């Protein structure tokens, strides 16, 4: 064990399956290799820019593109400590969730603003998928049904309560018998999936094409907020950049920056693996139709198929991992993930060959909603805390972060309303208590009846 309690033994290659799968750098993104090969440093960063974006993940890239759409002559620079897509954006499962504001699921039935917000984000996510397809044609943006699968009586009752929130929002879904256990439900909802790293690469290419400068290997160590005079961005290598405004899009790495006012969010670690290609018949028999499956169990396992392989993830942990090791997976976690995969495939199934293990971290706020904020008089825009929903949310809400960076109003009144509801949402203590009480009552009723309390249905 190391000093901060990390298992010393880890598995992985320091790249995600997606990084490796897109090995021939997709058009517009040779930054990973070129930054490594040329030893580019932060000295390549310009001394000044209109808007500096710190972090080249989905949040930073989509904000840059939305700024250029709104003001095509804007002078925008993205600085990344590693390369675009190094962080969670190049490592995730690739689901664009249709329910990307989970906190509102427990309150939507009693709070019309939250019901409206759920639906508005659902519609904006669908629009963001079309936008991503246009910006990044090679990113494999495609429809993929999301299946939320209960795994026992408790999660079955919980799922039926979630359905009340989805009903209140007016989002279509289908509640059917589960894939493995017919006595518990699965909720099916229209969604999209992407190839995460190809999406990053496509957006990076589009941003460069629109005139954004992207500098890799440029770690920011401190940002001085000078209010109306702008901000001074200090790079670890000693350079300083003066900007009119700066967008912080550093996700769970934000503590690596010195900021006068840090956002309140914590880092959650998540782990994934990919198998070798599996015989299509065996794949079909073991896991059924294609799509994106989330199993409602303590591991919160999720999986999808990519090029005949199972890409499987889950097991949230709060234990800190050093930033330079966060692509690796502690051996114990890797073995636990493999056990979950075996259970998903059926205990009799022989575990397929595993080719990749990787980890990553994301930034979670107490409400599970992002922080997209610019304090009055400040030159700093915070654009962080997208949690496990960042693929959908970063792109759906980028026009908001772009407006704040430009010092303009949101492009539509609806987006302004969404921003207010997000900012005003508090931890739903009462909503959560009501939710738990209803789930408990449902569990009791269904136990007495010996079956789920309501039949499967369509909405
Ligand atoms: C294993 C895993 C699976 C996930 N699955 C899903 C999923 O299926 N669907 C979903 O919606 N979400 C998922 N997520 C969450 C999603 O990936 C994130 O919410 C999203 O990618 C966040 O994007 P971002 O741009 O905010 O952060 P990141 O992609 O982490 O980007 C931050 C960038 O900032 C750079 N940086 C950090 N510090 C500095 C610094 N000091 N100076 C300069 N640059 C810096 C980093 O190098 C990095 O490139 C998953 C996350 C993980 C880890």
Image: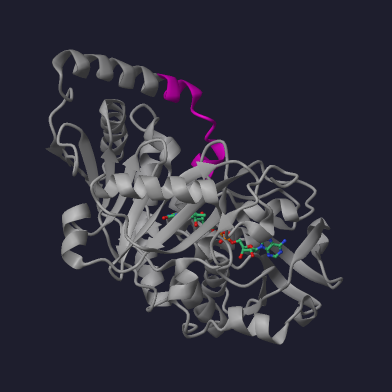
Q: Nearer the viewer, residue 353 or 293?
A: 353
Residue 247 lies left or right of residue 339; in this view the side is right
Q: Is residue 324 magenta?
A: no
* Quarter residue 408 falls in: bottom right
Which residue appears at 28% of the width and 35% of the height? 151
Residue 288 lies left or right of residue 330; in this view the side is left
Dominant SS in magenta: helix
Residue 32 lies left or right of residue 81; in this view the side is left
* Number of numbered discs visible in the structure rendering: 0
**Quick check: 113 above or below 252?**
above
Q: Which residues are magenta?
A: 419-433
Residue 113: x and y in percent read: 41, 36
Quadrant for the C terminus in the image: top left
**Residue 401 visible somewhere in the drawing:** yes
| Colour scheme shown | one colour
* Quarter residue 80 falls in: bottom right
Residue 190 lies left or right of residue 102; in this view the side is left
Residue 219: x and y in percent read: 74, 67
Quadrant for ligand 1 reads bottom right
Q: Is residue 430 magenta?
A: yes
Q: Nearer the viewer, residue 282 or 42?
A: 282
Residue 91: x and y in percent read: 49, 62
Q: Nearer the viewer, residue 222 or 450?
A: 450
């Amino acid at each position: 064990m190391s000093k901060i309690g990390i298992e010393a033994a880890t598995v992985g290659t320091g790249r995600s399956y997606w990084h490796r799968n897109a090995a021939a750098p997709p058009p517009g993104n040779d930054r990973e290799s070129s930054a490594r090969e040329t030893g580019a440093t932060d000295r390549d960063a310009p001394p000044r820019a209109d808007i500096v974006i710190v972090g080249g993940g989905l949040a930073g890239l989509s904000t840059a593109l939305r700024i250029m759409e709104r003001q095509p002559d804007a002078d925008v620079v993205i600085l990344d400590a590693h390369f675009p897509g190094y962080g969670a954006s190049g490592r995730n499962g690739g689901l664009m969730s249709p329910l990307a504001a989970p906190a509102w699921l427990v309150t939507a039935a009693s709070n019309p603003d939250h019901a409206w917000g759920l639906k508005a984000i659902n519609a904006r996510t669908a629009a963001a998928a079309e936008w991503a397809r246009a910006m990044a044609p090679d990113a494999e943006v495609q429809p993929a049904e999301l299946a939320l699968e209960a795994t026992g009586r408790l999660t079955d009752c919980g799922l039926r309560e979630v359905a009340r929130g989805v009903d209140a929002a007016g989002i279509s879904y289908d509640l059917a018998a589960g894939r493995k256990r017919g006595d518990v439900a699965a909720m099916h909802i229209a969604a999209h999936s992407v190839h995460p790293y190809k999406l990053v690469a496509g957006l990076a290419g589009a941003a460069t094409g629109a005139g954004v400068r992207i500098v890799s290997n440029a770690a920011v160590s401190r940002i001085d907020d000078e209010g109306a005079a702008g901000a001074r961005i200090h790079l670890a290598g000693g350079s300083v950049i003066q900007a009119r405004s700066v967008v912080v899009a550093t996700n769970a790495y934000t503590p690596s920056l010195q900021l006068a006012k840090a956002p309140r969010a914590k880092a959650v670690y998540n782990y994934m693996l990919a198998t070798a290609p599996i015989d299509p018949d065996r794949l079909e028999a073991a896991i059924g139709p294609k799509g994106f499956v989330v199993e409602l169990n303590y591991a919160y396992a999720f999986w999808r198929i990519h090029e005949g392989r199972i890409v499987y993830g889950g097991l949230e942990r709060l234990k800190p991992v050093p930033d330079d090791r966060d692509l690796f997976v502690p051996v114990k976690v890797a073995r636990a993930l493999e056990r979950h995969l075996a259970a998903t495939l059926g205990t009799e199934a022989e575990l397929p060959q595993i080719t990749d293990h990787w980890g990553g971290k994301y930034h979670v706020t107490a409400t599970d909603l992002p922080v997209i904020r610019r304090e009055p008089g400040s030159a700093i825009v915070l654009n962080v805390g997208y949690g496990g929903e960042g693929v959908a949310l970063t792109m759906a809400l980028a026009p908001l972060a772009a407006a704040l960076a430009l010092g303009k109003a949101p492009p539509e009144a609806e987006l302004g309303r969404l921003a207010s509801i997000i900012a005003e949402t508090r931890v739903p203590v009462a909503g959560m208590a009501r939710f738990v009480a209803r789930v408990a009552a449902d569990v009791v009723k269904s136990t007495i009846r010996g079956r789920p309390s309501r039949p499967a249905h369509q909405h």
